[in-house]
Image (cartoon, helix red, strand yellow):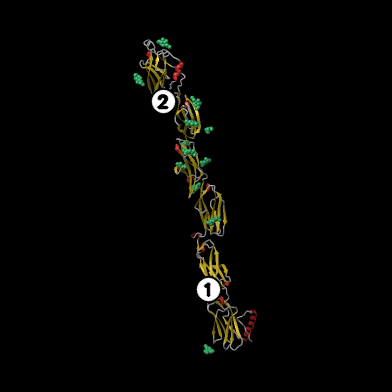
Amino acid sequence: MFLLVDLRNFSMASVLCVLLQLILCYTAVSSQKVELSPKKPLFRVGDRQKLTCQVNWCSGTVTFTWGNVEDKPLYAEVQPFPNESKSTLVFKSVQERIENTIVCKAKCEGQRMSTQATVKVRVYSFPNDPVVSGHDSLVSGKENTLTCKISDVYPAEHMKVEWLRGEKVVHTQDGEYGIKSIQSDYTFKPQPDDTGESIICRATLNLDDLPPEERTRETTVSMTVLPYFSLLAPSLLVSLQPDLSFIPVERGSSMTLFCNSSGCPQPHINWKNVRHQQNWRRIDNEESVNQLGPWTVDLEDNRTFICEVQCDSVVKSKRTELKVFSFPSDPTIEISGPFLEGNVNNLTCIVHDIFPVDCFHIQWLHGERELQSVHGNFSNKLQNLSLTIPIKPKDSDQNKTLTCEVSLKIGDRLVQKRASTTLEVHYSPKHTTIDVRPQKQLNEGENVTISCQTNSAPEGHVTLSRVWNGEKTKLVSSNGTQTSFGVYFTNLSHSGIYVCEAVNRYGSQTEEVQITVQASFVISSCFSTIAPPRNVSVRVYPSNEVQEGETVTVCCQLVSFPPSKIALRKLDNGKDIYSSDGTFLLVNLTANNSGVYQVTATNALGFQNKNFTINVISKKNPSTDDTGSSVLKRMNSIDFIIPVIGVGVLATIISTLDCMRRAKRKGLYEMTKGIP
Ligand SMILES: *[C@@H]1O[C@H](CO)[C@@H](O)[C@H](O)[C@H]1NC(C)=O
Ligand SMILES: *[C@@H]1O[C@H](CO)[C@@H](O)[C@H](O)[C@H]1NC(C)=O
Ligand SMILES: *[C@@H]1O[C@H](CO)[C@@H](O)[C@H](O)[C@H]1NC(C)=O
Ligand SMILES: *[C@@H]1O[C@H](CO)[C@@H](O)[C@H](O)[C@H]1NC(C)=O
Ligand SMILES: *[C@@H]1O[C@H](CO)[C@@H](O)[C@H](O)[C@H]1NC(C)=O
Ligand SMILES: *[C@@H]1O[C@H](CO)[C@@H](O)[C@H](O)[C@H]1NC(C)=O
Ligand SMILES: *[C@@H]1O[C@H](CO)[C@@H](O)[C@H](O)[C@H]1NC(C)=O
Ligand SMILES: *[C@@H]1O[C@H](CO)[C@@H](O)[C@H](O)[C@H]1NC(C)=O
Ligand SMILES: *[C@@H]1O[C@H](CO)[C@@H](O)[C@H](O)[C@H]1NC(C)=O
Ligand SMILES: *[C@@H]1O[C@H](CO)[C@@H](O)[C@H](O)[C@H]1NC(C)=O
Ligand SMILES: *[C@@H]1O[C@H](CO)[C@@H](O)[C@H](O)[C@H]1NC(C)=O
Ligand SMILES: CC(=O)N[C@H]1CO[C@H](CO)[C@@H](O)[C@@H]1O
């Protein structure tokens, strides 16, 4: 019987298998066997291995054919032994891929049917001992992880990894299908006395037929446990937020402090000795934070804050210092009173409720120049700090600005606040002046303006008055530092003394000026101002040459100030007759009255005289009764204007030809009568 089996196309698997079994039964019965060895091949990766196929029942030449069940290459070479009835399939270097069910077919020369045998080839790989790491720097009391790695394992799903401490298996792990390397982690908390203890990582490849010496590999390591004090929990980190060694913070502001712990799964974070609320929270497995506050800062927070983190047996702490300050308001300036020129006054700068006083500095400044300054002294509570400077102001200090600057220097931080004051210097009126425009000597009819100016602070008022006969008449008064008064078309009555009085609340100052208004009559030559007598002229009316018994009037004209006494005298007899108005009446003249007469005008500044002659012509007996009883009679003129202006001293005597008219009107007086 002959059954052709196509070994390269074994896809009709189950049916053919049944057939194959029948064939084998048949051949066994016929005892024509093919022998394939080894019977349970388990090849180590990398080795050179072979399968031998042999028949011993054929006397002729046997033809061997190698094949496999799975549809893939054999990855092997066939070595023929031509004179012997066997064939060898050689695997030069075993790999996982050679795993297969191998079929060897033998055909004996001369026989119609071939005979075959199959074998399942298995492969394993376990070339290296386990490698253990992490054992030499274990940290006491902390979770540590030891790692055991087994590489180039095949088939990994048959591998089991065990950790052994002494005889005790403390951890196991199985391999998985498809991987080549197996890693096993063993996590535990070593104690310091674990140092020197052995720990074993044992790997076992559980394959049937694998000899014990190939099956198990193990690595033993000695643990080194570092005591916590020789390497302070290197992964525990404590940090503060804000991360500053000291924090300037203003009283009344809101403050929050954070204490973060990282590298410890179960830390105890504690702010020490605080009354503010603490709020612990976990951020993740490694990080936690303890928030202090928020709270409102007060003076008692001016201290050190310590955060302590405990991680198992390890304690770490961090500190920060709050520097509390208080500087709530600008400084204020206090002035003890008004600044009176020449008086000492105090200027005080004060800043309230400050802390810490010893970090404050007060300065009085004029522009950039420091006048005075002071540093605060230590105090453990809120204080007011002040600086007083005495000021003795001059009027040049008027409107000077003085600044008070308060500085707080706390750490690198500088806070400044300031206040300013402008000096208002007070003084009584001074530099009072009167100004008369266009001038003090005026002609009647001119305009005049009288101005008065003063300097006072604060301003008061200024009054202009005229004094007449010791009586004061107010002309004008103004608030402020100046006033003025104008007169249009002046007349004689505007002459006088003008007084300016400047007043403020601290005092007064008076100035005066004399103003003279000159009358301007038709005969202006008769007017004068201060002068000795001059321009004396004499008129004799009706004539210098008269008949006996007649009367003449002598009128004098002159200019003089102050007024002059006017005397008339006959030069040869030397008797003086005086007149205040310069008019004389000579009555009932005789020949004896002929001669040279002299008029003399005298005032304080001097005198002037004028000679004139009178010639009396005899009527009948020129020699009779000429014994010279010429009588000079003063003429009492009361309606003649004598202008008197000014303060009762200024006067001008005016004599005019008008006297002739009056001489007539008054009639004649005997020369012998009426001599005063
Ligand atoms: C093998 O057989 C061949 C002929 O088939 C022969 O020439 C040769 O000597 C034999 N060798 C051995 C070792 O038997
Ligand atoms: C600390 O924790 C706070 C709050 O979670 C966070 O804002 C801050 O960034 C953390 N700081 C550090 C240094 O981790
Ligand atoms: C406040 O802080 C300052 C600066 O650190 C320190 O000199 C002072 O003693 C502290 N005051 C109090 C009351 O602790
Ligand atoms: C100014 O201060 C000084 C010293 O403090 C004091 O003696 C004086 O009376 C003060 N003067 C005035 C005007 O307040
Ligand atoms: C600080 O103390 C000193 C000494 O006692 C004293 O002279 C000074 O006036 C004080 N300063 C202030 C601002 O009080
Ligand atoms: C500071 O000044 C304020 C207002 O003048 C006063 O009420 C307070 O008592 C002062 N404080 C101190 C410590 O003198
Ligand atoms: C001072 O200031 C006042 C008001 O600004 C001003 O009227 C006055 O002229 C100033 N005085 C001086 C001397 O500057
Ligand atoms: C005086 O003032 C009046 C009014 O302003 C003016 O009409 C007149 O011309 C002035 N007289 C002189 C002499 O300036
Ligand atoms: C002058 O000042 C006084 C007091 O300040 C006031 O009563 C008066 O009305 C002022 N006069 C003028 C003309 O302004
Ligand atoms: C001078 O002028 C004033 C007015 O300014 C007038 O009241 C007065 O009567 C005048 N006096 C004479 C003597 O003319
Ligand atoms: C007037 O006459 C007297 C006597 O002769 C003489 O001294 C005097 O100088 C004369 N005066 C004038 C102004 O001529
Ligand atoms: C008016 C008058 O007195 N006439 C006298 C002038 O003088 C002569 C003589 O001396 C007298 O006789 C007049 O009576």
Q: CA distance from mark 2 to mark 1?
A: 151 Å
**252 over 215 or under it: above or below:** above
Q: Quadrant of the C terminus?
A: top left
Residue 479 place in picture, x, y as percent:
51, 33
Q: Is residue 448 visible?
A: no
Marker disc for residue 530: 2
Residue 271 place in picture, x, y as percent:
54, 53
Picture residue at 59% right of the left edge, 89% below the top: 110
Local secondary structure at mark 1 = loop
Amino acid type shown at disc 2 = Ile
Q: Nearer the viewer, residue 52 or 76?
A: 76
Count residues near mark 2 (Cα–Cα under 10 Å), then give few for <14, some for 14-19, many for 20+.
some
Marker disc for residue 19: none
**292 over 608 or under it: above or below:** below
Q: Nearer the viewer, mark 2 or mark 1?
A: 2
Q: Nearer the viewer, residue 433 or 292?
A: 433
Q: Nearer the viewer, residue 103 or 397?
A: 397
Local secondary structure at mark 2 = loop
Residue 87 place in picture, x, y as percent:
55, 84
Marker disc for residue 127: 1
Q: Sequence order check: which comes first, mark 2 or mark 1?
A: 1
Q: Extreme front residue here?
A: 620
**516 over 195 or under it: above or below:** above
Amino acid type shown at disc 1 = Pro
